[in-house]
Image (cartoon, rainbow, N blue to C red):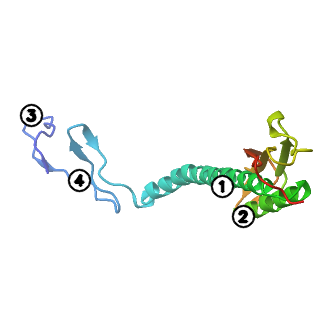
Amino acid sequence: MTDSAGSAPRDGTPAAPREVRAPPAQPGRVAATTGPGGPRQAGWAAGERGAAVVELLVVMLTLLVPLVYVMVVMADVQRALLATSSAAREAGRVYVTGADRVDAERRAGVAYREVLATYGMRAGDPGTGMRLRVGCPAEAGSGCARGFGPGAEVEVEVTYRVPVARVPFLGAVAGPGVTVGATHHTRVDRYRGLGG
């Protein structure tokens, strides 16, 4: 490039044109360009390459880890809901088919434990339990005595505590939890003959 507008010498003679050179290009940089919005930087220094990937990883981990954690807890809650509902229903069903009250309670307990085991849960876990409430309503008749017999009403309530605090590769640890439960109402058939 030449600079034709140079300054005039003091004696009044026109100045000779002189050449102005652009500074040498730096490695890893691209010269600034001018666009409609004004000057802008068209490239980055070599030391800044990959910064977007690192930022993306940080943001993804910040969002993804809690999201996966919540999904795992919600899946456990859903599994517990299915398990408690199935356990209550099955315990009630086998209770009303028992030969006597002792047999019915034993069979209901076995059904409760087996159904929870099917869903990968243990009946002995903290916050886990089954409660049977039985009674003879007035319309049950004389065959129903001490909460068992034709027409007896049975209510089975099953609860399970889903732990929320987890450690990767170790599983649940002591801490807060969500208790879920299910209740099943059933009745011994009024016209059923019981063994005896």
Q: Point out residue 57 in the picture as x, y percentages from the top left corner.
A: 51, 56
As shown in the figure, which amino acid type bears the numbered disc 2? Gly
Q: Are marks 4 and 2 in contact (CB under 8 Å)?
A: no
Crowd band around label 3 with a 10 angstrom C-alpha radius: few (<14), some (14–19), many (20+): few
Q: Point out residue 100 in the picture as x, y percentages from the top left corner.
A: 88, 56
Q: Are marks 4 and 3 in contact (CB under 8 Å)?
A: no
Q: Which residue is mark 1?
A: 79
Q: Quadrant of the C terminus?
A: bottom right
Between circles 3 and 2, the one closer to the viewer is 2
Residue nearest the viewer, comparing 108 with 79: 108
Residue nearest the viewer, comparing 148 with 174: 148
Badge number at residue 12: 3
Between circles 1 and 4, the one closer to the viewer is 1
Residue drawn where x is 78% and y is 53% of the image: 96
Q: Which residue is mark 2?
A: 120
Crowd band around label 2 with a 10 angstrom C-alpha radius: few (<14), some (14–19), many (20+): few
Residue nearest the viewer, comparing 107 with 69: 107
Q: Earlier in the sequence, mark 4 or mark 2?
A: 4
